[in-house]
Image (cartoon, rainbow, N blue to C red):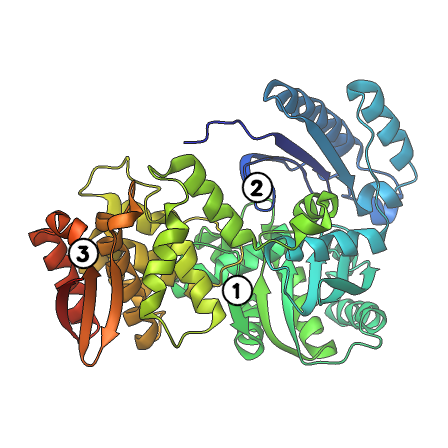
Amino acid sequence: MNTTEPDKTAVIDVGSNSVRLVVYYGAKRAPLQFFNEKVSCGLGRGLADSGILNPEGRKRALAAIERFVGIAERMGVKQIHTVATAAVRDASDGQAFCDDVLLATNISLRVVSGHEEAALSAQGVFFCRPEAQALVCDMGGSSMELAKIGGGDIELARTSELGPLHLQKFETDEKTLKAEIKMQLKGLAIGIEGPHQLYLIGGTIRSLAALDMARKDYPLSVINEYTLNAKDFKEFLKWTLKQSREEIEAYGAVNLDRLDYVHLVAQVMLGVLKALDIEKVTFSSFGIREGVLYEKMPPRVQRRDPLIEACQYFERTDARFPEFGTTLYAWVLTLFTNVDEDRKRLIWAACLLHDVNWRAHPDYRGEVSFDYVARGNLLGLSHQECIFLAVALIHRYRNKPKAKKLAELNEMLAPEDRVQAEIAGRAMRLGAMLGGPDVAHMGKLKLGKGKLILGIDQESEGLVGEVVERRLGSLAATMELTPEMRIE
């Protein structure tokens, strides 16, 4: 196993509502969040009227940044990136605040323009979905950015004052509020023709996703890639506006520091749906901080598949037999002759992850592997793809998985996808027994007329026993085929 310690990288994000430190660690193309802490400072509170940073927020933000730099240094972080957005760039004392940070920490804050902020948010989507063709909307405290992306390029990047801290002054007059939203969106939408998928980024926007998932009792507790069609999103926004603050709070899905902004954000989102031709919305947990990381990656790294790179990293660091996963994938793939590249990608990822939880007790490896994917935060997966992976991995370890564990998530998969996930899992279960440290004795799987054939060479015949025959039979039954063992 590779025990080389990867470098840690940190991003300190100084926003209008909060200051956050995230330390990243792991695969270069798909680093994990090693540490994540936020302080709700309210730097931009009152900025629209005063023109300066909130005095109390400024003190808290400086203290938070000092602490974050100290934490990062003690963690052995090699490089600390910073990004400061609308509040610092718009405030008349923004530069003075940057000077205070430099004096206290020896760190220079990177204050980005509205255009740069929109571009970084767009790159945050590329961090997870490099192939995305969509609009990207990032709502912070004092501003809202819009970008159009496709083919790995950012086609446009715009900014507006549609942040809740700016809009609060219109909150008591609904007519004026709607007019302000409409006017700002008119400028953002110039020249944008649809239909489009819309990625939504930002803390309060993610709170909307959490609220919708809570009211539906949605079975997957992962906000990233949560997707709604435009009609359902509009219905949810109208429902939100009818709820009182106390009713929303009762769901336990929205942080207390976001509650005051939920209705304002819902109003803006209704305006977005009216101003732009949107087919569906997808919530993203990745935004400006990940955009900073993506921006620093060489193009050859940017082009890598973040899902496969993450799975290869997990296999390299956690599996008993690193690099066997790709061999297993080639062995299993003979059963999937008519699937598209997206499905092959999921099967490859499953094979790479098939052994990373070997340290768990044998009775729980299936469940641990299931949760590893279904409740985790792998990049580049829709919720349905995430569940496909999870179902495949639980079948890799269990011939008869506990029905309760699978039932709620299985409902999100099409029947054909459920069967394919089970076949992939049972094939991995068989292949892992035959391969591992010595792939020369794995034999070959073949599809015959109504048969599933495992061809084993004479030298390996002695390695075949009852368990192999049973696992072959289980796989064949799932495929509605007759199992056959051939010594060749």
* Distance between the alpha carbons at the discs numbered 3 and 2: 32 Å
Q: Quadrant of the rendered structure where residue 38 is?
A: top right
Q: Earlier in the sequence, mark 3 or mark 2?
A: 2
Q: Amino acid at mark 3?
A: Lys
Q: Which residue is mark 2?
A: 31
Q: Residues within 10 Å of mark 3 (few under 14, many from 20)?
A: few
Q: Secondary structure at mark 1?
A: loop
Q: Which residue is mark 1?
A: 243
Q: Position of residue 373 (x, y in %)?
A: 39, 51
* Distance between the alpha carbons at the discs numbered 3 and 1: 38 Å
Q: Which residue is mark 3?
A: 402
Q: Which residue of the protein is positioned furthest toward the right in this rendering? A: 92
Residue occupying the point 67% across, 26% down: 78
Residue occupying the point 28% across, 43% down: 438
Left or right: 347 as drawn, with respect to 482: right
Q: Quadrant of the rendered structure where residue 106 is?
A: top right
Asked whether 227 or 338 is in front, the reply is 338
Q: Amino acid at mark 1?
A: Gln
Asked whether 6 or 100 is in front, the reply is 6
Give the foreground label among 3 and 2: 2
